[in-house]
Amino acid sequence: MARFVIGIDEAGRGPLAGPVALGLVVAPEGFNIAEAFPGIKDSKLLTEKKREFFFAELEKCAQAGDLQFSVQFSAASVIDDLGMTGAIMVAIERGIAELAVDPASVEIVLDGALKAPPEFRQKTIIHGDATVPIISLASVAAKVLRDRVMRDLAKQYPDYGLDIHKGYATKAHYAAIAAHGPSTIHRHSFIHLT
């Protein structure tokens, strides 16, 4: 049976608004991500232009059938209802289901404290997004698509500057929340106005 590795990472754990995004990248065992994506690293260490470049390359690889990927979102309301850990688990489970992988044929590597469903062989790697190329690629996919979502949400909720800070807890964002109140895309459990 074919053997595959899945790399998983999230983007948007800390913001006050918008979804958390989970990136999942599936590669055949032995596929050299570092060679196929030279310079890939944690999305937070890359410029927006470089992230977009790597994401376009990932899309090309997926279209060629070399890799598969999925990015799943859990909305602010899900984060408020289930907590961040629960919201992330929902997105991971949805991504794995979309990729239709057989638990017997894959090993999952995850960044930080992330966990996959227990039926999968898995390894959680602290700072995996900086040290394991397939996790880095998953982090790029999650970050690129989440940033695009936040730019779209900025058009629907123009009072908050979401296109600038992507929902993170900047002074300007807190000032906008104080002036306009939280919106339906804000994580009410994250907002602490004094």
Image (cartoon, rainbow, N blue to C red):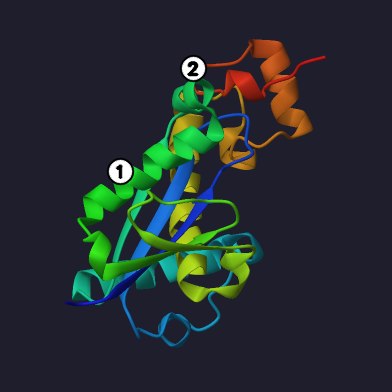
Residue 10 visible? The answer is yes
Q: Is residue 147 left or right of residue 99?
A: right
The percent position of residue 187, horizontal first and vertical second, equals 57, 24
Residue 110 sits above or below residue 114 on the image: below
Task: Choose mark 2 or mark 1, whichever is in front.
Answer: 1
Mark 1: few/some/many CA within 10 Å (<14, 14-19, 20+): some
Instruction: Tell me the kind of residue under disc 1.
Output: Arg
Indicate which disc residue 10 carries: none
- Secondary structure beneath label 2: loop
Q: Are marks 2 and 1 in contact (CB under 8 Å)?
A: no
The percent position of residue 51, horizontal first and vertical second, equals 51, 64
The percent position of residue 167, horizontal first and vertical second, equals 60, 35
- The quarter of the picture where residue 141 lies is bottom left
- The quarter of the picture where residue 138 lies is bottom left
Indicate which disc residue 184 carries: 2
Q: Work out which quarter of the rendered image holds the C terminus and state it.
A: top right
Q: Residue furthest left?
A: 1
> What residue lies at 69% left-to-right and 28% top-to-bottom?
173
Mark 2: few/some/many CA within 10 Å (<14, 14-19, 20+): few
Indicate which disc residue 94 carries: 1
User: As rendered, which of 135 and 140 lies closer to the eye?
Assistant: 135
User: As rendered, which of 187 and 162 lies closer to the eye?
Assistant: 187
Instruction: Tell me the kind of residue under disc 2.
Output: Thr
